[in-house]
Amino acid sequence: MKLTKKIVSVILACLLCISVGTTAAIAANYIGDAKVKEIAFEKAGITAEQAKFVICKLDYDNGIAVYDVEFYFDKAEYDCEINAKTGAVLKFKKEVSGVNVPDPTTEYIGKAKAKEIALANAGVKEADARKLRVEFEYDDGVAKYDVDFHSNKYDYDYEIDALTGNILKAEKDREISFSDIFFVRWIESFIAAIRNLFTK
C-alpha cells in the first residue's frame, strides 16, 4: 500500500508540473485581464471608473479560450465575451434592470462579514477552511456574496444577502478525492498484476 501511495504521488506530481507549465505557456499568449476590460468598457461606451463590480474570468467556449467580463453601470448589467488571443468581441449583452447598483462600501455587509456568517453556519473555523473564496454578485436586482470553501472532506457553498446578511443558499457536498475514484484502484490492480508476473 505504501508503494502504491508513492507511485500515485509521483504520477500526480508529474501531471501537476506538466499542467502548470502548459497553462503558463498558453496564458502567455493571451491578451490579459487589463486589455480585456479596456475592450469591454470601450464596447459599452464607458470608462473604467464608471464600471461597478467588474468580474473578469478566463473560460473556454467550444474549445476557444475567452474572457467573460461582467460589470454594472447606470441601472444596467453588461456581459461581454472576448477572444483571449485576438481581443475580438464575440458576444455583448446589456440588460437594463431598472435598479440602481448600491455602493458596497457604504451599504453592504462586506466580504469579511459574509465569510464569518457562512463559516459560523457551517460550524467550521476559518483556520480549517481550505480554498476559501468570497465573491460579490449582483443578479436580477439582488446583491449577494458567494462563499465557497472546503473542510474535512466536504465542499460548502453559500449565498449571503449582501444587505441583510441573511443566508439565501447553503449547500454541503462530500468532496471527491483520488482515493474515492477508480484511478487508485486501477493502479493497485496494475501493481498487483506486475507482482504476480515476477512471483510466478
Image (cartoon, grey):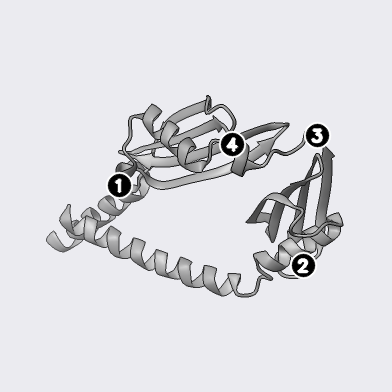
First in sequence, mark 4 or 3: give its number. Answer: 3
Compare marks 1 and 4 and give the one earlier in the sequence: 4
Q: Which residue is mark 3?
A: 97
| Residue at x 30%, y 54% (from the top left corner) | 187
Residue type at mark 1: give it.
Arg
Front disc: 4 or 3: 4
Q: Residue at coordinates 59% horizontally, 30% vertically from top-left?
A: 163
Q: Which residue is mark 4?
A: 108
Instruction: Provide the residue designation for mark 2.
Output: 87
* Amino acid type at image mark 4: Tyr
Tag 2: amino acid: Gly
Q: Residues within 10 Å of mark 2 (few under 14, many from 20)?
A: some
Q: How many marks?
A: 4
Q: Position of residue 44 (x, y in %)?
A: 84, 54
Which badge, 1 or 2, comes first in the chain's sequence? 2
Disc 4 is placed on an element classified as: loop
Badge 3 amino acid: Ser
Provide the residue designation for mark 1: 185
Image coordinates of residue 159 in percent, x first then y, are: 54, 32
Who comes first in sequence, dot 2 or dot 3? 2
